[in-house]
Image (cartoon, helix red, strand yellow):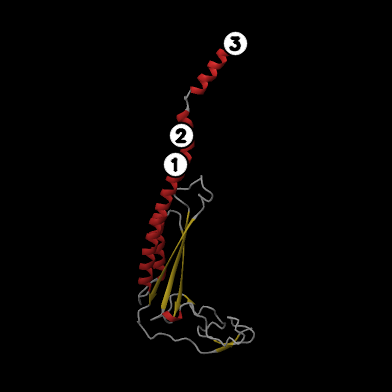
Amino acid sequence: MTSTNQPETAILRAIADDETGTTVMEFGLMITVFMTLLLGLFDLGQMTYANAILKGAAQDAARSSSLETGNTTLADAEVADAVSAVAVGATVTSSRVSYFDFEDVERPESWNDANDSGSCDNGEIYTDENGNGEWDADIGQSGNGGAGDVVIYTVNVSYPPLFPNPFLPGGSDARTLSASAVKKNQPFADQATYGAAAGVCD
């Protein structure tokens, strides 16, 4: 009985001691981790570089747009060109909001908040400072404003990753970046003042 089991035991021991193919298995286990780290590093590097390019281009565009000779269409196009050179296939959108002065940034139009609701309603009287016929929680006006106005220039970018990572959830989703710049337009003319017409909130 013992002699019958000896060959089987020897075979089992041989199999247990056999390390053939271990390297292939270890490589199979490690390659996923390695590629995840490598692609993540490349993706982060591209995003960091694109973000630096975007911020610099946005500052330049905001500066050039603050001049009397400023061309906002051309400035926006230059930002898009700069970003697209780093993030191929990027979608670039920009917006400008102007204010009379820095203290007016994101300020609501004046109103008598009789019910302390923090919003103009229930027949409360407001001053239509930006002249659009309605009360605004942000007094800013869309566009590049006029002489002496403070302008917040915002650029949003969405682009497909150059190094998509199939090993992570969302690793192939579009990347998004954003940059803002605040500039005061040059006083190339008399600055328009806010309106003083009254209105009534519903």
Tell me if mark 2 has few (under 14), some (14-19) or many (20+) residues whose alpha carbon lies within 10 angstroms of its own.
Answer: few
Q: Where, quadrant-wise, is the N terminus in this rendering?
A: top right
Callout 2 amino acid: Phe
Q: Which one is earlier in the sequence, the residue at label 3 or at label 1?
A: 3
Residue picked out by circle 3: 4
In the image, which is nearer the foreground, mark 2 or mark 3?
3
State the separation of the CA atoms marked 3 and 1. 48 Å
Query: Where residue 201 sits in the image (x, y, percent)?
Result: 61, 84
- The three-letter code of the residue at mark 1 reads Phe
Residue 125 at x, y percent in the picture: 59, 88
Query: Depth check: 118 or 177 in front?
Result: 118
Q: Secondary structure at mark 3?
A: helix
Circles 3 and 1: CB atoms closer than 8 Å:
no
The crowding category of the residue bearing disc 1, from other C-alpha atoms within 10 Å (few below 14, some 14 to 19, many at least 20), is few
How many numbered badges does the structure rendering display?
Answer: 3
Residue 95 percent location from the top left of the image = 46, 69
Give the mark, 1 or 2, whose residue is nearer the N terminus. Answer: 2
Quadrant for the C terminus, please.
bottom right
Q: Is residue 98 above or below residue 33?
A: below
**Placement of 7 over or under 119, stated as above or below:** above
Q: Please give the residue where the numbered disc 2 appears in the rendered image.
A: 27
* Residue at x-position 40% and y-position 62%: 54
Query: In what element is the residue under mark 2?
Result: helix
Q: For this rendering, which residue is in front, 14 or 113? A: 14
Using the image, tell me which numbered label, if any, was put on residue 34: 1
